[in-house]
Image (cartoon, rainbow, N blue to C red):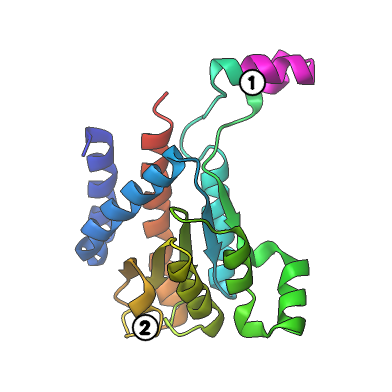
Amino acid sequence: MNQMIRDMTDDLFQRYPCLAPLADVLAAAVETIVDCHARDGLVLLCGNGGSAADASHISSELLKGFLKRRPPASEQADALARELGDASLAAKLQRGVRAINLCDAASIITATANDLGPELIFAQQVFALGRPGDILIGLSTSGNAENVLRAMQTARAAGLTTIGFTGARPGRIDAFCDLIFKVPETETYRVQELHLPLYHALCAQVEALCFER
């Protein structure tokens, strides 16, 4: 672990000591996403309600700069400048980790709910988009959301790595998570309050490792 990552981890657990038991899960999740990015893989995310908003939040932190700028590589900058006809505009674009929030796709969600059943609204997208080596991050404060469960099961069958964010109680998704962040709360809003610092730390550490230059 490099010093920057160590400092980020120490800061997280100083502010939220109750999350310290999740240190190994955090390190493994960071490594998994960094490896996925190195292979040009895709991170898919899903959840319901506030967890859908969290999925959107995570994807946005991955897709553009979070704590640091991620300027295009020199060859990218040259190509962008040629096509955009404006080097200063091209330089504003930022590199990202390929990520998609499955909760934002209203057309396929409603079509799937109508034609196949609402429990498959995320599973259908995972089945169509996911490839071996990709990642599905599923958020469910109870661990029992049917549509997240079906997405996790589909992801496992398709060869994706599954990462769960949930609460302290045992949940149905637990058995289908390769890595799981079980925070020590059970009330929905309190679970979500602890998910946020965890995924901020996750995104910050992924960024630090994927975009060192």
Please say if the residues under marks 1 and 2 sit with CB atoms less than 8 Å apart.
no
Task: Say what secondary structure mark 1 lies in.
Answer: helix
Magenta segment's dominant SS is helix
Above or below, 63 against 144 in this view is: above
The one of 166 and 108 positioned closer to us in this rendering: 108
Q: Residue 20: percent from the left, percent from the top?
A: 21, 61
The amino acid beneath tag 1 is: Ala
Q: Residues within 10 Å of mark 2 (few under 14, many from 20)?
A: some
69 up-or-down from 7: above or below: above
Horizontal arrangement in the rendering, residue 51 relative to residue 38 (left or right): right
Would you say residue 64 is visible in this rendering? yes
Residue at 36% in and 70% down = 177
Asked whether residue 13 is drawn in magenta, I would say no
Around disc 1, counting alpha carbons within 10 Å, would you say few (fewer than 14), some (14 to 19), or many (20 or more)? some
Residue tagged by mark 2? 186
Using the image, determine if residue 7 lies above or below residue 161. Answer: above
Q: Is residue 132 left or right of residue 122?
A: left
For residue 91, which numbered disc appears in the image?
A: 1
The amino acid marked with disc number 2 is Thr
Q: Earlier in the sequence, mark 1 or mark 2?
A: 1
The quarter in which the N terminus is drawn is top left
Q: Quadrant of the C terminus?
A: top left
Using the image as rendered, state which of residue 211 and residue 176 is in the foreground: 176
Could you tell me how far apart the alpha carbons at marks 1 and 2 are, in whole angstroms? 45 Å
Q: Is residue 130 left or right of residue 39?
A: right
Q: Where residue 66 sits in the image (x, y, percent)?
A: 50, 41
Residue, x 47% and y 32% (percent of image)?
68
Instruction: Report the magenta residues as a range.
Output: 77-91
| Magenta span includes 78 | yes
In this rendering, the label closer to the viewer, 1 or 2: 1
